[in-house]
Amino acid sequence: MNKLIPGQRALLFIGSLLFSLYVLAPIGWLVSSSLQSEAEITSVPPHWVPEAPTAQNFRAIFQATDEKVTYETRKQGDTATGGFIPSTAANLLPSMKNSFIVALAVVVLNLLVSVPAAYALAKIRFIGRTTSIYFMLSTRVIPDIALVVPFFLFVQKLGLMDNLLSLVITYLAITVPFSVFILTGYFESLPDELDKAARVDGCSRLQTLVLVFLPLALPSLVAVVLFTFLTSWNEFLLALMFTQTPASQTMPIVVASFTSDFNISFSFINAAGVLAIVPPVLIAIVFERYIVSGLTAGAVKG
Amino acid sequence: MARIQFESVRKQYPNGYTALENLNLEIADKEFLVLLGPSGCGKSTTLNMIAGLEDVTDGNLRFDTEVMNTVPPHKRDVAMVFQSYALYPHKTVYDNIAFGLKMRKFAKAEIDRRVRDAARRLEIEPLLERRPDQLSGGQRQRVALGRAMVRQPQVFLMDEPLSNLDAALRISMRAEIKQLHQAMQTTFVYVTHDQAEALTLADRIVVMRGGVVQQIGSPDAIYERPSNMFVASFLGNPPINFLKGRLGQTPSGLVFRNGSTALTLPPQAAQKLAFYDGREVVLGIRAEDVAEEGGAAGDACLSGRILSVLPVGSDQFLELEVAEAKLFFRVGKECRYREGEQARLAINLNRLHVFDPDTTDNLLWA
């Protein structure tokens, strides 16, 4: 790195501080307000640091599972503050489970399909190879909203409405092309001679992939896992179309439903929001080391 | 142990490019065969086909009598060393060397014995726990050799294994590879574009160009009796000189003429060239086949102006302008010619090559 003159260093620091604030402020407010009562959230000026922190909102979420919330009982969850509990509150934890099942299934199936596909596209020369890469990638230029109707008909014909499988299938259609693209690029950056060496050393194609390429591709595998997990975890549009009952509703759908209830409880919504970002944040922390090296893909040449 | 046989083998890539046309080649058991040629001549393709890394489009590839066309690489008993070494970056040196044996389900003790034995022979024992990125180029090359050695394969394939090393290391590794071949008593097929490597290592050299074999023979035969102008120009440093001219019968014998230059060919050459009386030919003169005049007859000398003198330590290169052609010769240090002077160099007429200008074939050794 070039030497920085003192003023530059300070400017860079201030710049990055401002950017971090810009990115982190909404999350900070989400977390802070999830610990505030309804009255405190709506106070003017807002309190960035809760004056009277309370875990009532989270308690309400976990209690809501075994309590039927109706118009009459809606205020019972947040007794301390007199806030409201949404009528669909009981669906939150089951929906979180649904989100997990869908995301995990998508992550695993996506890897099973895209890893061998990417290896073949990167290391085996066959007719139509580049065409297939571009064709797959071109499916990503179609906005999801354009796919909703065809997907809907297809899911309906298969009788998969209100079934988690409908989400797994459609999310795979969205994530696989992109994963194949990322992994193909990475495998291509690994030298062909490595592939040849492994095969002469006694590996079949599959063994070459598993024993030599996968360990080297760990950073981009992590990138792919994160991408697919986050895509499935956050997806809203398709989930809204294909899920109708709590049996298959995912977290974004249920959290969104809180905004269209008898009354709106900001504190409850924010607490749910915090729960929703916990899994992605945990994953990011665990794999942080690999995410950084995944971004500098191709630097691991043999 | 294996004899390798190419029977009318053709290789065409899916994009339509033909890398090899009708290759017929027999590699004897325990032979050291070098495939030599410029890049894109099909030598690496040939090697990859022996390894099973490339399909055979047409024809047959046999190990001994067995046709190997569709046998995948992991079922062939071959080992390969690559130009880029291709070590597994995530494995230690020990595991790199042991990998091929593990894949072939050797017993742990046997693997350990072989790995340590190879490491001792290649003097890389202290490096066994390191990873490839902690090694120098020469050390990586040794590991790559070790990885191939421990397998004790039927066929040992090398794809420009020394090209990434510096000059000094290359020469010492050349000697080691030669020793390795003697110690292992197995078939070696070695690809290179470096004539010096080919000449030092090979039992036989195959010179290739554009997917077609130009000549197969011992290093001596290839150098002394090149079958065409391409082979002649590919070996030799500086490269062989070509001089166009016309043959003519005179009382003293068959004479090659170009402007004021007239060289009388020796009787045995004249005999072979009798049919070419009066026709145009290309004369090939190896850079080292000249000497200072020293009283040689006028019909065995080249005269011209010295364009440059390039000392190269042990010798010097002279650039001589003869009849508008620029010729390079290698002479001893005692040669006193200076730039701009007129020089007369005696030619060793017995070592001349004569080529047909149209077919480029060697007319003396056809």
Image: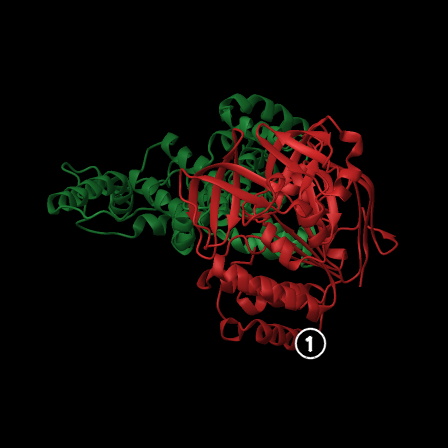
Residue occupied by mark 1: B110
- Looking at the picture, how far across and down is residue A6, in whole percent? 11, 47
Q: Which chain is green?
A: A
Where disc 1 sits, the SS reads: helix
What hue does chain B carry in this figure? red
- Looking at the picture, how far across and down is residue A100, in whole percent? 51, 47
Label 1 CA crowd tier, 10 Å (few <14, some 14–19, many 20+): few
Q: Please, is residue B103 above or below residue B337 in the view?
A: below
Q: Is residue B91 left or right of residue A278?
A: right
Identify which residue, A41 or B340, lies in the foreground. Answer: B340
Q: In this view, does B75 lie to the left or right of B39?
A: right
Does residue B19 appear anywhere in the picture?
Answer: no
Q: In which quarter of the image is the N terminus of chain B?
A: bottom right
Q: Please, is residue B178 above or below residue B164 in the view?
A: below
Residue A163 appears in which quarter of the rendering?
Answer: top right
Residue B273 appears in which quarter of the rendering?
Answer: top right
Q: Please, is residue B107 above or below residue B13 in the view?
A: below
- Looking at the picture, how far across and down is residue B170, in whole percent? 53, 59
Q: Quadrant of the C terminus of chain B?
A: top right
Q: In this view, does A284 lie to the left or right of A53?
A: right
Tell me the chain of label 1. Answer: B
Q: What residue is drawn where x is 70% and y is 30%? A: B247
Residue A262 appears in which quarter of the rendering?
Answer: top left
Q: In this view, does B275 lie to the left or right of B232?
A: right
Does residue B228 appear anywhere in the picture?
Answer: yes
Identify which residue, B301 or A10, lies in the foreground. Answer: B301
Q: How is the image coloured?
A: by chain
Identify which residue, A46 or B329, lies in the foreground. Answer: B329
Q: What residue is drawn where x is 45% and y is 42%? A: A230
Identify which residue, B165 or A263, lies in the foreground. Answer: B165
Q: Which residue lies furthest to the left in this view?
A: A7
**For the residue marked with disc 1, what is the amino acid?**
Glu
